[in-house]
Image (cartoon, rainbow, N blue to C red):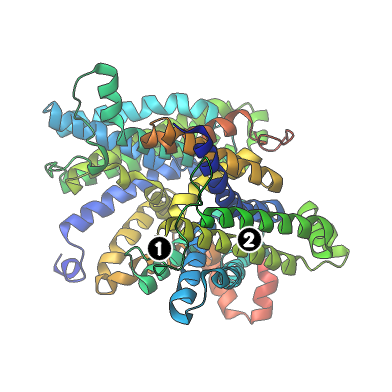
Amino acid sequence: MNLTQQIVNAIWLGGVYSLFSLGYALVFSILGILNLAHSAIFMWGAFIGLTVVLRLNVSVWLSIPVAMLGAGIIGVILDAVAFAPLRRRNAPRISQLISSIGASILLVNIAQLIFGTQPQRFPLGSIPAESIEGLPFRITPIQIIILVISIVLMIALQFLIRRTRIGQAMRAVAFNQQVAGLLGINAGQIFQITFFLAGALAGAAGVLFGLAYNSMTPFMGDQVALKGLTVIVLGGLGNIQGAVVGGFVVAGLEVFSIAAGGSNYREAFVFTLLFLMLLFRPQGLVGEAQQNRA
Amino acid sequence: MDFFRSIGITEIVFQFMLVNSILGLSIYLTLYTGMFSLANAGFMAIGAYTGVILTQNFDLPLGVALIGGMILGGIIAIPIGFPVLRLKDIYLAIATIGFGEVVRILILNFDTLAESITGQEVKLTRGALGITGIPKITETWQLIVFLVVVAYFMIRLHRSRFGRAMAAIRQDEQAAANMGINVVYVKNTVFIMSAVLAAAAGVLKAHLTRTISPGDFGFDQAVSILAFAVLGGTSTWIGPIIGGFVLTALPEILRDFKQYRGIVNGSILLLVIVYLPGGLVNPAGWSRLWKRLRQSPEAGENHART
């Protein structure tokens, strides 16, 4: 077992997991709901990217912003269809969880109808596949680019939330929707922006995941859906920095359990960790205890 | 009977309708107590595998296998329920999803795990391919009897002191505790009952489908079970039965549109939760929807806000 190699694998995979989970965490932190259709948007992002590359013959890199835009729009539609009507009625959070499950089934099945169930690939030669020479471990350019894009997007999100007016409004709505409304913030609009951002992040993660494994099916979201849950639980639900940390922890756990010969159990490790976290530290690895959780 | 057959509801479809109603009732018990648990697919898997191993490897009759599966499901629910039921809504949902996945992965790897411990070749759960060639020995009348017994149990439960305590906990857990209800006891007992029922449905269903594999009991199955109860409504025990019937029969009635099956299922779940939050069996919900449709859009908006 080459330790450096495992660490390298864990880092780039962690980048994708973190990027995917950021959208989960973002929606949870602003709206307090768990959007289980997030993984379906992730899959749609990958397919939008693929379609752009195949039909318009553009480079793989240009497909990323297009996929982000497309996935963001799907996010906004999702909000309008599955969440906004329930919000208006003040429905319990569980109803919104169920409606997101319904939306997820719908999105996956529409994709199945359009793209079929066979695995699809980016065209040969569009992704640089040779690993870089002269390093003590194996890494391909695409893995480095995935990591760089993930980190750039994470920093951009952090900047948006901490330093801009929109971010300020988002935090205000998250803190208290009613008071934010009294201060002239249009909460509905903030929710739409939140869903757009979450969708865009999922779309980017989808394309990157597709590039990394170069195999896309309408069910690819299943591979990350529940891992994303573990990631945000590790980070403390709704904690955005926590989700970044959680992504790398889950990727590390997975990579090292494969390296240690337990590839059959790697998911069992991940879900056992999820289970134990909820029981013993529901506030996450870095968070502070809150009353309403346990 | 001919009418039902002509629209696609054959005997085997009817049998699945009955089994799915039992599954709907199993999650109904926890939902009725205000617990959002998605562990039922996991308990169903435990029941299914226990039942099949008992009938196939030990040549026991279905009745014994049914009881065996129910007992094991109930026993496993005890240590799971105690820590997990301290969690609430979304946290409970996530933890029980995690439980379901761990069960699925353990069944998947059970043989290799047992081989590494005992040092002998073990062929019980047969890995990812699952167990095939299970005889189809569950009869329709057995399913009907079982469902009737469960329904009778539900009626008795709702009228009992324990059933009232369940409803009280759903309304307000703190208030229920203040009234002297032992919340921990009620919640755990309900969780065990729910697990026993899911395990029973697992045993019965395994002897209908002829094959079982760990993939049959994943997150999708947990969501389907939830959909039966949500579609039917969780205010009475009739709801999940109707929900199980409708959601199982509908794809068969619409079998000409097979490729749209998932789209129909997803849309139904979405439409019901948005427009009929109480489910199909909920007169108040229907009359509210009727009023909203008859009123002008603006008035409907106001109504929705109040």
Image height check: is A292 above or below B13? above
Q: Position of residue B280 (x, y in %)?
A: 44, 61
Say which element carries label 1. loop
Instruction: Judge by depth and name the residue closer to the eye, B254 or A270.
Output: A270
Task: Inspect the image, locate mark 2, and give the three-letter code of the amino acid beneath it.
Answer: Ala
Q: Which label was assigned to residue A198?
A: 2
Q: Chain of mark 2?
A: A
Q: Residue furthest right?
A: A183
Q: Chain of mark 1?
A: A
Q: Which label was assigned to residue A218?
A: 1
Name the residue at 67% across, 74% down.
B301
Image height check: is B168 above or below A103? above
Q: Position of residue B270 (x, y in %)?
A: 49, 64
Name the residue at 83% across, 66% down.
A185
Name the residue at 42% across, 40% down.
B101
**Residue B223 seen in render:** yes
Rounded to the nearest whole Å, what is the CA distance between mark 1 and mark 2?
Answer: 19 Å
